[in-house]
Image (cartoon, helix red, strand yellow):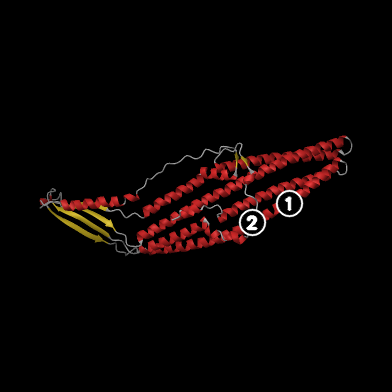
Amino acid sequence: MKSMTMPAVCLGALLFAIPAANAQDSAPIAQEVLPLSQGVSSPSVSLHDAIKTALQNSPFYAAAIDRSEAMKAVTSKAGALPNPEVSFEMENFSGSGPYSGTENAELTYGVSQLVELPGKRSGRVNAARGEEKKSLFEREAARLDLIRDVVTAYATLVAAEEELDVLREEKSMATNVYDSVVAKVDAGKEPPIQKNKAAIELSSSNIALERAERSVQTAKRVLANLMGVPSEGLVALPGTLPEMKSPLGLSAYADMIASTPDNLAYDASIETAQSNLSYERAGMVPDPTFNVGVRDYREDGEKAFLAGVSIPFPVFDMNRAGVRRAGHEYNAAMLDKAQALLSSETALAENYELFANAYQENKTLNEVVLPGAQEAFDAARIGYNAGKFGYLEVLDAQRTLFDARKQAIQTMLDYYRAMAVIDRMTAIHSTQTQKEKTP
């Protein structure tokens, strides 16, 4: 019998080389899940620390990170070559006559390899890279979403705490006015009806104070949930909010939209769709499969090499539907981006109006209205104690003062809410390092 050492060695070397060539693409299928932070060290928290803690503890942001990491594996898989196929055949055995056993059988050992034509693997890889880019931009968008929500919740808590302080002062003043009215009624200087009015005003202050206390607790729970910490004892520090400044011009914010992660994610979707279109067009030409092997003729102990190629004949499926689908998806991706820009510009204009109005109203309230209301109330109270004004004048001045204070708090909250939305839309807090990591 002739030796088959050389064919067997060649075949074995081929089988060994293919997985070795792909070994560099191998990666662990799971990573260690790190524990989340357990909370902040102090219940008094600055805005910066609130954002930092939320980014550490948020399942929403952690999920976005994992999705972006998963897309890296998709890109790696897209670049892998097709696996070879190993085959074994036995012919002319267990029949009749001389073929009743296996002495005259023919054994064939073979390897088949699909060879992708140019444009297919590159198109698949480019499409996966586009999806990977998109996932990175979506990860950054999730980060910006969380920052926006934390800023809004933090400002809401600050406003709730400040309103609670105002209502406590209002109750204290209402109590003082009530005591003063009671004294005048008892002295016969005021009719009894004024005592009832003062009591009603004091009761209204109590109701408003209780409502404000509940609002503070709700605001604490919202912020604590975003941060992933207990809400008990959580206190916001008003001085850590950004200074209220006059907004830039609308065009300055509009110019930032094109470079936001959201818009760049649409660019990545267009890139993916374009790569998919190229891949589908390349798929109109079928890939050949090459076969090599060794045949062992056991009847006479001879050996022979086998070689062949097979190519699918595109009669029923020429992948025209795949090309049409990819073409429409490419057009849709470009239209999605155009619509997103229009929607962003509309939303920016609406929020900019709220932003600018809140700033101007708050400025007017603090510089003009509040000083005047405080002066009027002080004068009314002094005049009432001196017998120059009636109770109604004091009550009206008191309501004007505290309404102005609460309005100033509300415009402050409106300012920071609109600021958080505009900062999110323009990606003010976007990290440059994230963009630099984008492939």
Dot label at residue 247: 2
Q: Nearer the viewer, residue 399 or 237?
A: 237
Q: Nearer the viewer, residue 430 or 355?
A: 430
Q: Nearer the viewer, residue 379 or 1?
A: 379
| Quarter residue 171 falls in | top right
Note whether 22 is above or below 340 in the view shown. Answer: above
Q: Residue at 72% across / 53% down in the picture?
A: 364
How far apart are labels 2 and 1 at the CA level?
A: 18 Å
Residue 204, percent across and down?
A: 75, 41
Quadrant of the rendering where the C terminus is positioned: bottom left
Q: Is residue 353 left or right of residue 26?
A: right
The amino acid pointed to by label 2 is Pro
Residue 387, percent across and down?
A: 88, 41
Q: Residue at 73% across / 47% down in the picture?
A: 405
Residue under label 1, please give it: 367
Q: Residue at 24% across / 53% down in the picture?
A: 14
Q: Secondary structure at mark 1?
A: helix
| Quarter residue 209 falls in | top right
Residue 76, percent across and down?
A: 38, 52
10 Å crowding of disc 2: few (<14), some (14-19), many (20+) = some
N-terminal of the pair, mark 2 or mark 1, is: 2
Residue 137 appears in the rendering: no
Q: Secondary structure at mark 2?
A: loop
Q: Is residue 238 left or right of residue 432?
A: right
Note whether 196 is above or below 283 in the view shown. Answer: above
Residue 104, percent across and down?
A: 12, 51
How many numbered marks, from 0 up? 2
Dot label at residue 417: none
The amino acid pointed to by label 1 is Glu
